[in-house]
Image (cartoon, rainbow, N blue to C red):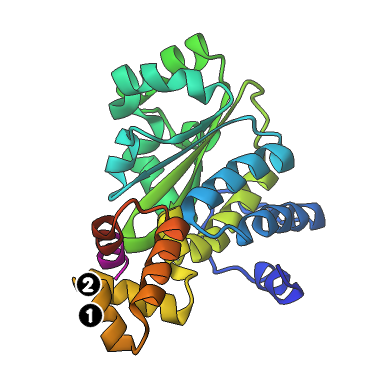
């Protein structure tokens, strides 16, 4: 993370926010700390782990989840989200009973997430009555069962037009005030600029990090060429090609040439 990156933070894209809290120096420092921890992530799985950890250390948020999906609404059905704190234990009941009634799947929350990047329970309540199903989710699931008084979600844009929702929960009702929400909104825009470009898996990241020669070999494997044919195409000894392929398989974690070919084709 460079000083120029910090300069970018100071002039984020204009976003409409329901609470126009003026960002303080400490808020920018918090945003910088989170971005600095996430900027070095080589893949999306690495970033989501860094983000969940840094939200805990920077904002004191210990109960965090990271859901992803091809569309906004499919995000709530993610069966393998990253969960931290009590969200690990909340997940089975959430999937069994409550995912379709999630507070942040309501029209008002969706508009807020799309336009500002963040939505919170407190803000949605201030706008008016919650839909009956969302109100039941809040009262029975969040409050009664899990004692969660604070609830917020941050939207991130992923490669291929996919969406991530980072859920943040706490037993303290004032854990996320106007300044914290404004900082998270700043982070939503800045992090989306990162997440849109990240490889979607660690294998894709490893593939992108191969040398030019290794990538040439991968492309020819994906085209279905044998080691002998690759050797002739690249003017290499066949033993050298075998070594290249073995190293590439070890680096990417692929178990076979077919798996490598499929990975390369998916990577584009």
Query: Which of the numbered marks, if any, corresponds to residue 34?
Result: none
Where the N terminus falls, by quadrant? Answer: bottom right
Q: State which quadrant residue 122 falls in.
A: top right
Residue at 49% in and 69% down: 209
The correct choice, above or below, for 234 with respect to 47 in the image is below
Q: Nearer the viewer, residue 62 or 223?
A: 223
Judging by the rendered image, the residue that carries numbered circle 2 is 226
Please tell me which residue is depicted at 40% across the width and 62% down the height of the picture: 246
In magenta, the rendered stretch is: 263-268
- The secondary structure that dominates the magenta segment is helix
Q: Which residue is more in the foreground, 221 or 91?
A: 221
Percent across and percent down for residue 158 are 40, 57
Any magenta on residue 266?
yes
- The secondary element bearing badge 2 is classed as loop
Query: Is residue 195 one of those drawn in magenta?
Result: no
Farthest left residue in view:
224
- Which secondary structure, mark 1? helix
User: Please, is residue 160 above or below residue 86 in the view?
Assistant: below
Q: Along the horizontal axis of the image, is 186 left or right of 4?
A: left
Residue farthest to the top? 144
- Give residue 175's position: percent from left, percent from top: 67, 31
Report how far apart the C-alphas of labels 1 and 2 lie in the structure.
Answer: 5 Å
21, 163: nearer the viewer: 163
Which residue does the numbered mark 1 point to in the structure image?
229
Assess disc 2: are there few (<14), some (14-19) or many (≥20) residues with their C-alpha within 10 Å of its C-alpha: some
**Where is residue 132 shown, x and y percent of the image?**
32, 21
| Mark 1 vs 2: CB contact within 8 A | yes
Whether residue 15 appears in this view of the structure is no
């Amino acid at each position: 993370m460079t000083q120029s990156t910090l300069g970018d933070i100071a002039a984020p894209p204009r976003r409409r926010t329901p609470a126009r809290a003026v960002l303080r120096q400490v808020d920018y420092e918090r945003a910088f700390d989170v971005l600095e921890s996430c900027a070095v992530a080589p893949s999306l799985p690495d970033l989501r782990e860094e983000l969940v950890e840094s939200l805990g250390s920077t904002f004191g948020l210990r109960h965090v989840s990271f859901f992803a999906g091809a569309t906004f609404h499919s995000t709530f059905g993610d069966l393998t989200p990253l969960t931290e704190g009590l969200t690990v234990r909340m997940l089975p009941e959430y999937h069994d009973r409550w995912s379709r009634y999630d507070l942040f799947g309501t029209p008002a929350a969706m508009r807020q997430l799309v336009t500002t990047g963040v939505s919170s329970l407190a803000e949605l309540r201030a706008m008016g009555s919650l839909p009956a199903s969302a109100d039941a989710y809040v009262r029975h699931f969040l409050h009664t069962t899990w004692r969660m008084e604070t609830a917020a979600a941050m939207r991130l844009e992923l490669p291929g037009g996919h969406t991530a929702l980072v859920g943040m929960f706490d037993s303290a009702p004032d854990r996320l005030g106007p300044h914290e929400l404004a900082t998270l909104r700043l982070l939503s825009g800045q992090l989306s600029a990162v997440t849109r470009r990240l490889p979607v898996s660690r294998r894709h990241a490893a593939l992108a990090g191969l040398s030019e020669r290794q990538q040439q070999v991968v492309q020819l494997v994906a085209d279905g060429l044998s080691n002998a044919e690759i050797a002739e195409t690249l003017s290499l000894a066949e033993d050298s090609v075998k070594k290249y392929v073995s190293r590439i398989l070890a680096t990417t974690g692929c178990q076979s040439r077919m798996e490598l070919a499929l990975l390369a084709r998916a990577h584009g």
